[in-house]
Each structure stands twice: as C-alpha cells, then as structure tokens.
Image (cartoon, rainbow, N blue to C red):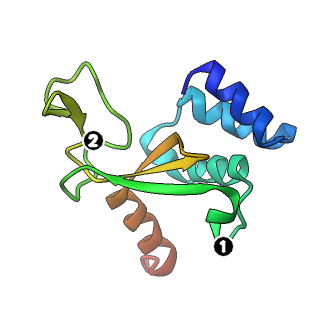
Amino acid sequence: MDKTTYRKLVTKRSMNKTQEAALYRLMQNNYQHDEMRDKLRDFMTAANTRDDFHEPDEQEVTAVLVGRTLDNAMGDEQMPDDSSYPEVMDGRHEYREKCIELRIDKIPICRLNLASLLALAANKWFPKKR
C-alpha cells in the first residue's frame, strides 16, 4: 500500500490515532515470521473488528485466498528478489503457498500464511503439554 492509499483509507474511515498507528505498522510491513499475532492484531485494530472477528463485513473487511500449496516455509509476503517465489503465471505473480489476503474497503492490507494461521489456532486450542 502506498502513502496516498494509506491517507485515503485513514480519512475515509475516520480512523482514530490507535487505528491509524496500526494501519501504518501494516503499511511498513516490518513484521518477522513469528510475529503473526501482532500483524493480525494490528489488522483488527485498523479495521475496527470485534475481538472475536464476528461479522467483519460490517467494517468492509474481506479476505481472498491466494496461492496453491498449503505450506508455511516461505511466510506471508512476496519476495520479488527470489526467482522461485512467487512464481510467475500468465504474466502475473502467483503465490506458491496459500495466504489469506485481508482487505479493508477492497484495498489489500496484509497477507497471512494459511498454514501458519492453522498452527496459531492449533497452538491456542491444543497447547502442548510439557
């Protein structure tokens, strides 16, 4: 997301300072692979969704599944310098690994690797006994 799109979204949605800060962090995309919870929390804050993510469509939140394989070795984001990822199909980039692309007002905001999301849910619901 570029700065112009960022400003338009902040203005259109009348974001408060907390929401704007979360959207800014998402725009900067300085998350590490193991910080998926922070990325999701920032998205929920920016989109003003409920903690249980109930009816996010009321906040104009949509999701698109991209990619072909269920794997989490490569993470969430495109790596344009890596010729093997994403793959170029029909003249456009295509993710090899399945990611959920979260959008606000149809604007792509962030991607979360589907296998990593499943791992996050599994660890929450079925914690390992040590």
Q: Is residue 108 above or below residue 128?
A: above
Residue 3, horizontal then vertical, whole percent: 63, 19
Report x, y in % for residue 17.
86, 37
Task: Identify residue type, mark 2.
Answer: Met
For the point 25% across and 46% down, which residue is it? 73
* Residue at (54% x, 45% y) in the render: 106
82 w.r.t. 14: above or below: above
First of labels 1, 2 by sequence position = 1
Specify whether 20 is left or right of 92: right
Q: Residues within 10 Å of mark 2 (few under 14, many from 20)?
A: some
Residue 71, percent across and down? 23, 55
- Name the mark on residue 76: none
- Report whether 79 appears left or right of 3: left
Q: Which quarter of the image is occupied by the C terminus?
A: bottom left
Q: Amino acid at mark 1?
A: Asp
Residue labelled with disc 1: 52
Callout 1–callout 2 Cβ contact below 8 Å: no
Q: Nearer the viewer, residue 60 or 27?
A: 60
